[in-house]
């Protein structure tokens, strides 16, 4: 039995290489939309996969070189726009993706034993590019780590400014497809242009966009705000919800309100987070959650669009309102937030971001990103599907992750202040038979951070 969740160091037999497209690609500048280059998206989405059996390195490199012909912007480099120093663009120069090979004295079984929650030692599973800034890191960085038992860990970092969750899944499946079938055509042709999301002229901002409206909240006695990770010790928590448990949450809303699994679980996690933090009852708290706009726009975004085709839905309530009301109330707030995300709303947001380069209001907000319906858990490079799929590190955002072997289950992974972790996990697992069992008076709560 392992005594620590720390994993061993990686051994690099060779220096990382650059894998470039294996045939000439267009050389031009790729415009990024206002949804692409938002300041809060200037990081890489980092995925981690565990496989029972390794795939040949040369096979992975060859298929990567081939797929980068189609996804050539990922082989380019980000830079500041020559027209606007607050916007980014992609120099499609074919320079290549970083590919690192490593070995770790560890087994698949040992990793599965420590894989319930990410920890900082997992960061060594992705080669760290030495750069002075975010712009100096190539849009695509990959590390393949062979294990002692013949298994394999695959870590990928894909720049969020170039692709969202749907887009990254589309790219990874294209890579896997060409690994198993080198001479095949792609199942989905990538659509590169982001001009379909250009701002209007003149700008037309017709909504308040509460997701970007900064709120001012009182500080706790120790000087921290509701959730300021820079001033607190954050720890990852992880809870898996079975289809039966999710159905139980949904039944708390019927017969007066029907809801989706996401709406029920998101509302439950939001209320649990607030209950655990126990802030003053009058504080306004937000739930921000990613919603795909691919089918909401008129016309719809083209098939194969892999750029950022999502916006943040924003539900808002006072602490007292959210926690003392029944489950249906929280779900209704989520549904109302989703209903506002029309074509007009999205166009207004694009124009709003053209006028104001702002970040979402995170001062008293829970942010949920749904990875559980992207097909990420089905990535097969020819030796079978993954035994584990998740983020490389636990960030402040809440992730809804797929459950390997259970397409209707969801794992909720998020970091919370260490002082409330136990309470948060307890409330998260609490399934009242009746809503009357919920907290009666939030006014009796005391700040825990």
Image: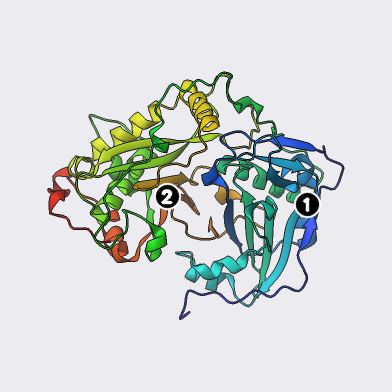
Disc 1 marks which residue? 96
Q: Residue sitting at 60 percent across and 75 percent down? A: 106
Is 117 or 53 nearer to us in this picture?
117
Residue 206 location in percent, x, y? 44, 21
Mark seen at residue 410: 2
Q: Nearer the viewer, mark 1 or mark 2?
A: 1
Give the crowd class for mark 2: few <14, some 14-19, many >=20 residues within 10 Å. Answer: many
Give the crowd class for mark 1: few <14, some 14-19, many >=20 residues within 10 Å. Answer: many
Q: Residue sitting at 20 percent across and 44 percent down? A: 282
Quadrant in the picture for residue 33: top right
Report the residue that reaches farthest toward the right: 24
Mark seen at residue 23: none
Q: Is residue 33 left or right of residue 329?
A: right
Q: Residue sitting at 50 percent across and 46 percent down? A: 371
Q: Is residue 430 visible?
A: no
Residue 428 location in percent, x, y? 29, 54
* Label 2 residue SS: strand
Q: Is residue 138 visible?
A: yes
* Label 1 residue SS: loop
Q: Residue sitting at 64 percent across and 33 percent down? A: 305
Is 383 or 57 nearer to us in this picture?
57
Q: Give the Cα distance between marks 1 and 2.
A: 35 Å
- Name which of mark 1 and mark 2 comes first in the sequence: 1
Q: Quadrant of the C terminus?
A: bottom left
Total count of labels: 2
């Amino acid at each position: 039995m392992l005594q620590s969740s720390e994993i061993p160091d990686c051994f690099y037999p060779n220096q990382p290489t650059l894998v470039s497209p294996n045939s000439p690609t267009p050389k031009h500048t790729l415009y990024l939309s206002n949804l692409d280059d938002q300041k809060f998206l200037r990081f890489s989405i980092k995925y981690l996969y565990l496989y029972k059996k390794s795939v040949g390195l040369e096979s992975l490199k060859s298929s990567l070189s081939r797929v980068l012909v189609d996804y050539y912007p990922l082989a380019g480099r980000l830079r500041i726009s020559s027209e606007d120093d607050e916007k980014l663009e992609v120099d499609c120069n074919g320079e290549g993706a970083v590919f690192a090979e490593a070995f770790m004295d560890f087994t698949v079984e040992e990793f599965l034993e420590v894989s319930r929650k990410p920890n900082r030692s997992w960061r060594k599973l992705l080669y760290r590019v030495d750069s002075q800034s975010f712009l100096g890191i190539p849009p695509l960085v990959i590390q393949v780590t062979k294990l002692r038992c013949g298994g394999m860990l695959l870590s990928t970092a894909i720049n969020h400014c170039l692709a969202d969750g749907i887009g990254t899944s589309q790219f990874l499946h294209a890579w896997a497809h060409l690994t198993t079938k080198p001479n095949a055509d792609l199942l989905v042709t990538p659509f590169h242009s982001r001009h379909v999301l250009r701002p209007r002229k003149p700008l037309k901002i017709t909504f308040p966009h509460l997701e970007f409206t900064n709120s001012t909240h009182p500080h706790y006695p120790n000087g921290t705000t509701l959730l300021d990770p820079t001033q607190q010790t954050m720890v990852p928590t992880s809870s898996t919800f079975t289809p039966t448990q999710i159905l139980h949450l949904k039944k708390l809303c019927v017969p007066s309100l029907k809801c989706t699994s996401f709406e029920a679980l998101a509302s439950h996690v939001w209320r649990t987070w607030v209950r655990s933090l126990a802030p003053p009852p009058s504080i306004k708290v937000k739930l921000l959650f990613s919603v795909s706009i691919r089918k909401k726009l008129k016309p719809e975004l083209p098939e194969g669009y892999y750029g950022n085709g999502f916006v943040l839905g924003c539900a808002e309530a006072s602490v007292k309102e959210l926690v003392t009301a029944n489950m249906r109330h929280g779900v209704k707030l989520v549904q109302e937030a989703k209903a506002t995300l029309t074509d007009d709303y999205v166009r207004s947001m694009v124009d709003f971001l053209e006028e104001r380069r702002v970040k979402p209001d995170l001062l008293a907000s829970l942010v949920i990103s749904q990875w559980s319906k992207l097909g990420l858990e089905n990535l097969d490079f020819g030796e079978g599907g993954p035994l584990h799929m998740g983020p490389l590190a636990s960030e402040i955002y809440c992730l809804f992750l797929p459950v390997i072997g259970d397409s209707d289950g969801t794992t909720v992974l998020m970091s919370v202040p260490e002082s409330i972790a136990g309470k948060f996990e307890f409330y998260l697992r609490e399934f009242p038979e009746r809503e009357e069992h919920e907290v009666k008076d939030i006014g009796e709560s005391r700040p825990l951070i």
